[in-house]
Image: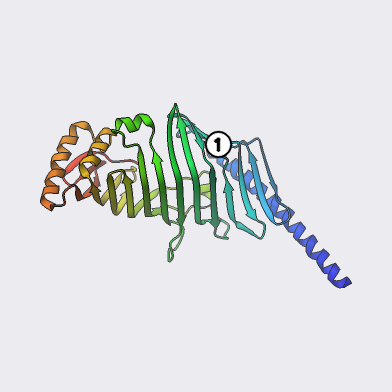
Amino acid sequence: MRLLTILVIILALGWTGYWFVGAQALESAIRSAINEAREGGIEVDTASLEVAGFPNRFDTMIEQPQVHFPSSGITWSAPFLQILALSYRPNQVIIALPDTQELTGPFGAAAIDTDRARASATFSPSPSLPLDHANLVVEDLLISSAGRDLSAKRLLAATRIPEGAEDGRVQNIGITLDDVKLPDTLARQLGGAATIDGANLNATLTLDRPIDRDTYQGGEVRIEAINIETLDIDWGDVGLDASGDLQVGADGYLAGELSVALNNWPRALELAATAGLIPQDQASQARQGLSLLSGLSGAGNRIEVPLSFRDGRIFMGPVPLGPAPRL
């Protein structure tokens, strides 16, 4: 019995030592990452930073974090940020976000309110800590800016290294949005189309480098290719399905082709033109071209057309739609 007591004491002392050494190492690593981000030009401020949770957790509490990106002029701030991990599984973390956050930038100021916002991430146990998989769950999201409100009932996002991939340069991503309510002013401009019932994206990204320690400290990761397996959008009486492969050039412009199916294409074209996605002077040309395609296919208000990205522009079949997005 005495031997057992001594063994328990030794184990307890050993675990206590492990926790305190691990907590100090974790706090030092976070502070080092913040300093390296600052050296890289990202402005990071905190009111306090400490690690607690003895004996079974490493709970990092950061009070009043603020991150400013001078290149874009965007600043994110929040009352707190929690990073939680089990002390016996430190490569798996949970990130607890507050119910209120704020973004400011060239667009002005935006308040972000949620009923629940949680993220988790698992890193491969190697010195560079490459990301293996992660997910984000946001419920009852509300973004308010200058009296304009954008809300979503639920936002789900996830990424993971696909099976068989050699490294973290390839990532499967999935994004789901439910009940997205557009700002009233935009809804009126679109003729009352206020709610996007749902949107789903399942895609594979090829990056120029893995997401790892350097990325967490402010290093840039560039997307080289996007394989869209499925993109579904249900917007009232309008529906869109798309899939295809896109490349991202050194200049950031997309190149490639998507196969797009539109339900109720006249209404979809009207919404795109009203939202400014298609220049008004090209909307009539697009309508004539899509009407011809619809008549030839005999599919009525549903058409399937190729959406091409080339030379910095977007084409729907032979019809130019406008400039292509630049990543």
Classify 10 Å Cα crowding around label 1: few (below 14), some (14-19), many (20 and above): some
At 45% from the left and 30% from the top, the residue drawn is 145
Residue farthest toward the right in the current orientation of the protein: 2
Work out whether residue 1 can be spotted: yes
Is residue 120 shown left or right of residue 14? left
Q: Residue at x 30, y 30 (%)?
A: 189
x 11%, y 45%: residue: 292
Asked whether the viewer can see residue 327, the reply is: no
Q: Is residue 192 left or right of residue 87?
A: left
Residue 72 image position (x, y, % from top left): 45, 34
Q: Position of residue 261 (x, y in %)?
A: 24, 51
Residue 245 vs residue 238, the one in the foreground: 238
Secondary structure under tag 1 reads: strand
Q: Amino acid at mark 1?
A: Thr
State the image coordinates of residue 202 (x, y, percent, origin top left): 37, 54
Say above or below: 229 vs 32.
Answer: below
If the image is split into quadrants, where does the C terminus sit?
top left
Callout count: 1
Is 118 left, or right, of 197 in this rendering? right
Looking at the rendering, in which quadrant would you find the N terminus? Answer: bottom right
Using the rendered view, name the quadrant where residue 149 is placed.
Answer: top left
Vertical relation: 173 (above or below) 61: below
Q: Which residue is mark 1?
A: 100
* Residue 280 x, y percent position in the rendering: 21, 32
